[in-house]
Amino acid sequence: MLRFVDRMATVTTRNLILNDKVRAFSSSKVKSLVENYFDLNFRIHGPTGEEVTKGLDLKDKTCLITGANSGVGLEMTKCLNLCGCTVLMACRNTYAASVVAKNTCLKPDSLRLYELNLASLRSVRKCSDDLLNKEKKIDIVILNAGIFGLPWTETVDKLEITFQVNYLSQYYLLMNIEDILADNARVVIISSESHRYVTLPFNEILTPTEETLSLPKNKYSSIKAYNISKLCGILAMHNLGYRWLNTKKTVISAHPGSFVKTRLCRNWWLYEAIYTGMKPFTKTIAQAASTPLYCATSSDLNGLSAIYYKNCERCQESDLASNLQLSFRINDLTKDIIRDRVTMSELPVSLSDTRQKHDVEHNIEDSLLTNYSN
Ligand SMILES: NC(=O)c1ccc[n+]([C@@H]2O[C@H](COP(=O)([O-])OP(=O)(O)OC[C@H]3O[C@@H](n4cnc5c(N)ncnc54)[C@H](OP(=O)(O)O)[C@@H]3O)[C@@H](O)[C@H]2O)c1
């Protein structure tokens, strides 16, 4: 009996030692697998926003971010706030945004909230007036808010909602607050690689109409509307780059990353499923914030304007997006669309000033490519 108990004890001890070895082996394997995953992920998808802005002192800077309460916008708010930057969060629901910001940001005292519903030009005007009344100077503007995947929806301004929210209203906001932009202000327009998939018939490139941009119901697909809005963002960048050629203001367009699992895909279960499935293989939200933040803050880009960035590197946008003549035509059309919908008193000077249009028409042929920065 004693011998049997002794034998059992030896077997149990041996099993325990074996178990420990197996556990130690598997935990080190899991650890190294996890480390390898993060290492690979870093090498493929690059740094996070926090890594890009680490050590920056932005105490004397003020940055306006649209759609700052969610996804990439919230991550950028968090990183800039960490560097001491005053962040003006322009959001649809300011109460919800303030709760999110308090839970996310380490220095909530340097955040200010502004109500902005981009689906209404009246709300954009109201937000611009609030900004003009309360802020003295804005150093950085990040036009980030965006929507994707909605069924065809018309806004109160009788425009297709994706076009209005992603492009037109944010352009209008920027024009309204131009007077308080710092002399060396930097504007970052969040675009997307999806701008490459827009094809326009030749006649619409020559003479785009409202229907080219604000798709009517019978020509609508959510992907097409999104791609067009993102193309418009890059074209607006070129137009502003030209307009600010003799100033220190600069404008850059940035692609945060593809299929980043944010609330962007919330409007249809299929997009939600695709983005969820892609999540392990794409940038995290923290990584998606890096390129826009690099464009907004890096001193490497001082003096550079009208360029498109992805993965924190300069990248050539599509032929259509770099078509400067088209950028001027779209700009004129944008102004006309806004003029048709707002009263004269609501028009910013830059939109009501017709001189600029003629200057542009005279200068466009000879000066663009030679003068354009980079
Ligand atoms: N995620 C990607 O894979 C990806 C890829 C390329 C480009 N982008 C671009 O990155 C930007 C940020 O998107 P995200 O991925 O971070 O998506 P997100 O989490 O859905 O954030 C979008 C933001 O836009 C705001 N917004 C939507 N409609 C608005 C309106 N009518 N008025 C005011 N604000 C409105 C949202 O506010 P609410 O919370 O109130 O809705 C939210 O704060 C977008 O421009 C998007 O097109 C994203």
Image (cartoon, helix red, strand yellow):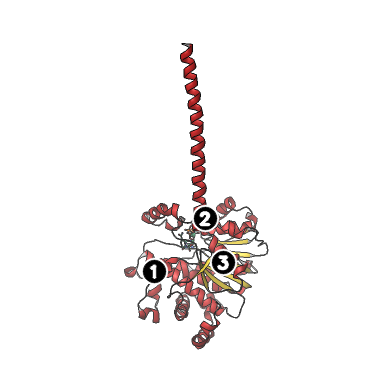
Query: Element at badge 3?
Result: helix
Circle 3 or circle 2, nearest the eye: 2
Q: Nearer the viewer, residue 29 or 111?
A: 29
Mark 2 CB near ligand 1 (8 Å cut): no
Neighbours of disc 3 within 10 Å: few (<14), some (14-19), many (20+): many
Query: Element at badge 1?
Result: helix
Q: Residue at x 35, y 65 (%)?
A: 221
Q: Nearer the viewer, residue 176 or 40?
A: 40
Query: Element at badge 2?
Result: helix
| Measured Cα–Cα span from mark 1 to mark 3 | 24 Å
The quarter in which the C terminus is drawn is bottom right
Residue 252 visible, this orientation:
yes
Q: Hey, which residue is sitting farthest left in the picture?
A: 218
Residue with the mark numbered 1: 197
Residue 71 visible, this orientation:
no
Residue with the mark numbered 2: 42
